[in-house]
Image: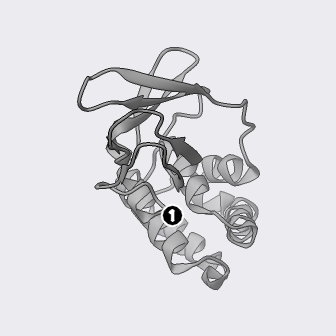
Amino acid sequence: MSATISNASGGVESIAFALFAVRTASGLQIQASAATAQLAQACAADQSLAPGGTTSCSLAFEVPTSESPTTLVWLDPKTMLTSTASLPAVMQSSLVNTCEQVLAFKNFSTSSCLDCIQTCKGNSSACSQTENNCAAACAMNNPTSQGACTCIDHCATTDACRQAGIAEYQCVLDTCSAQCN
């Protein structure tokens, strides 16, 4: 997610990504993912904002698909008070949907399934090195969890990369169901 942050206080405020979380409709609070560091224009781990300053940066959250994020939360490390902002209702992208269908395969981690998946590896040049590194970090941190798909979706910051990801997962769905289910 891309966030525009303004500092209306009288002092310098830390906007390190670890200070951000999303709250879901059910009340679950999820901290920003370490994969944030791999995003283009990421909110850095050591970033601060001067009084009156405004900046935009990206944050990644690994929100379970059964949850709906409703609120962005920032924790002031000096006072331990929080500031919040409502999030717009967001529909899941087809990248998330196709990714989750692939990860739902019963035999996802078998060698025959993984070999088939390799035949569907698409055009990784459609994604920037930053997008590819971010997606790899999501997969390593969540190799079979649904959170990985949401994380990967946040990594795909360009339409070309998102479409390449959808095409790759769709290929797996169309080609590998016999080996993976």
Expressed as whole percent of the image width and height from the top left, the position of residue 83 reads: 45, 25
Q: Is residue 143 above or below residue 158?
A: above
* Residue drawn at point x = 52 percent, y = 53 percent: 55
Residue 12 image point, x, y percent: 32, 43
Q: Residue furthest left?
A: 78
Q: Above or below — where is 74 with respect to 41?
A: above
Q: Which amino acid type is shown beneath numbered disc 1? A: Gln
**Viewer can see residue 152:** yes
| Observer-nearest of 148 and 113 | 148
Of residues 93 and 97, the one drawn nearer to the viewer in this rendering: 93
Residue at the top extreme of this rendering: 26
Q: Residues within 10 Å of mark 1 (few under 14, many from 20)?
A: few
Q: How does the figure colour the protein chain or chains? A: one colour
Q: Position of residue 168 (x, y in %)?
A: 68, 69
* Image height of 24 relative to 115, above or below: above
Q: Is residue 84 above or below residue 49?
A: above
Residue 1 visible? no
Query: Position of 40 compared to 51: left or right?
Result: right
The x and y percentages for residue 156 are 62, 63
Question: Which residue in the structure is indicated by mark 1?
Answer: 41
Q: Is residue 80 left or right of residue 86?
A: left
Residue at 32 percent across and 30 percent down: it is 76
Secondary structure of residue under mark 1: loop
Nearer to me, 112 or 22: 22
Q: Residue at x 58, y 54 (%)?
A: 154
Q: Residue at x 43, y 54 (%)?
A: 43
